[in-house]
Amino acid sequence: MVEPLLKVEGVRAYYKLGRVFVRAVDGVSFEVNEGEVLGVVGESGCGKSTLSNVLMMNLRKPLVLVEGRVLFKMGNGFLEISSLGREEVKKRLWGKEMAVIPQSAMNALMPTIKVRKYVEHLAESHNIPKEEILEKIRIRFQEVGLDPVWLERYPFEFSGGMRQRAVIAIATLLNPQLLIADEPTSALDVVNQKIFLKVLMQMKKRGIVKSIVFITHDIATLRQMADRMVVMYAGKVVEVSPLEEMLRKPLHPYTKGLLDSVLTPEPEVKDRGITTIPGAPPNLIDPPTGCRFHPRCTYAMKVCREKEPALVEVEKGRKVACFLFTEEIA
Amino acid sequence: MRLVVRNLSKTFSMGFFSRRHVEAVRDVSFEVKGGEIVSLVGESGSGKTTTAKMILRLLPPTRGEILFEGKDVWRDLKEREELREFRRKMHAVFQDPFASYNPFYPVERTLWQAIELLGEDLSKQDKLNLIKESLLRVGLDPKDVLGKYPHQLSGGQKQRIMIARCWILKPLFIVADEPTSMIDASSRGGIIKLLEEMREENGTSIMFITHDLGLAYYVSDRIFVMKDGRIVEEGSPDEIVLSPKHEYTKTLVSSIPKLYKRMEDLV
């Protein structure tokens, strides 16, 4: 039986800019199960990075949680982390229970502070003896393929791939249950991308982390490692599905469009051809009525303009928010 | 042969007191036929953009020659008129649609400039009509674009205007340096189709400069793989992707995540 590790329930997180709201995450619900790699995919501006901040409860103005709950499994029950403040979550969960590899991990380290300093910082803020943690990081560095002498060096001396591995080594030092990776590979060349993915999967295989949420625009990368997929469009989750089934038969028209626009060096892609989704993603200050995808959707019906489709389970383990599948239910 | 590149090299010298030399491009040779689409594929630092800049006559080579329509672009083009002709026939579409526009002018300025480059004697109204037609051709509504400033348009729209410019000039050769890297995947197909149409209609040769082997595989007739300033392998897309010969190409192909196949050596 799969147990959820993290539950997101009806979350709305908006950026408050003066009198207007940017509805970056707007009514999103899903679970991250124990032991899974959950892929979150969407194009730029769909709210996926905001989502990673919500999962961590890393809410700083102008980003505010308007509605909904985020629950994290602690012991036998769930802790409603969305009812705690950012500082409280930071103190109790960050590093120990959940950790993030941010999009800008390349720049997450100050170039002029030795890597060892970061680790010592970690020891201080979690009241762990320095020597113990330094011993741990030496081992962890070797595991990710970095010589421990690099602990005494400055981040600017690292190559991009090495910096990314240093960040993952430090982020997972306290064996957090959940690791959130937000576009961790987009700044790396393909050879380093693969090395990074290997390191990431090793972390999970060896039980250092239990679950991984991997956020990216790159479906081909997710295809290599994700168990389930969450597809986001304009602040909404439009489809949740096991990866293989989604690839075999995408349900939501947006998912299909996204898959058909992937260009990988494979004969199948040439045979399939490449399609374009007409139009552009909407402005999240004033999103379209009804289904947010309807202005770009070739299947759009009258109902799509008027009503918002709910995310409904249509097959076992597969949810979709589209009237093509749920009209009769709605 | 529309373009012949022979033994092209570029060495950058750096430093004041102790001069360091970086060989960005080393002895690169290839040819591009009329109506052919080729791709120069390599990681950052492989010398692919430097090669493109030399072909576009933006950066002088250290050694070697570039013959475009039989003329050496660095030695034979002397008169202003010849250069103008060259700029009309050889066109670039750059990676960053944001940097190709002057933020102080409406975006159609680049199209007016293209028409000036054409050098044809047209009335203002005819010119405007030509601009409108070019925008329609690339799938843009002139109403949405004319009079707008660069910051008011999306990356995809700006990239399309650059292609509208190509459509006005109908160049013989387009160098497209990462033309799709700043655009979302869902709009990328449109740009590729537009460039393919340029080839179909006018026999334009296109050279893609890209790190994206997926793109190169999809659009090209031939692929050149660059590594450390050299072309290490050349072949048809199927040869490069399905049976790579050079070690580097093998590593590159096996490192790229695929959609229809899961990497076996990841876990």
Image (cartoon, coloured by chain):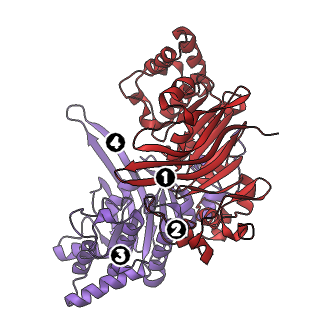
Chain colours: A red, B purple
User: Helix or strand or loop: what does disc 2 sit on?
Assistant: loop
User: Marks 4 and 1, how far apart in space?
Assistant: 46 Å
Who's the residue at 75% across and 70% down the image?
A328
Q: Which residue, as the protein is rendered here, is positioned at the far right? A: A1
Who's the residue at 69% across and 47% down the image?
B263
Whether marks 4 and 3 lie on the same chain:
yes
Q: Nearer the viewer, residue B214 or A259?
A: A259
Q: Residues within 10 Å of mark 2 (few under 14, many from 20)?
A: some
User: The residue marked by circle 4 belongs to what chain?
Assistant: B
Q: Quadrant of residue A174?
A: top right
User: Marks 3 and 1, how far apart in space?
Assistant: 26 Å
Whether marks 4 and 2 lie on the same chain:
no
The mark that comes first in sequence, 2 or 1, is: 1
Name the residue tied to disc 1: A24
Q: Residues within 10 Å of mark 3 (few under 14, many from 20)?
A: few
Name the residue tied to disc 2: A289
| Residue type marked 2 | Thr
Do the CB atoms of the residues marked 3 and 1 lie less than 8 Å apart? no
Q: Is residue B131 left or right of residue B45?
A: left
User: The residue marked by circle 1 belongs to what chain?
Assistant: A
Name the residue tied to disc 4: B22
Where does the image place residue A246, in percent across and percent down from the top left? 71, 58
User: The residue marked by circle 2 belongs to what chain?
Assistant: A
Whether marks 2 and 1 lie on the same chain:
yes
User: The residue marked by circle 3 belongs to what chain?
Assistant: B
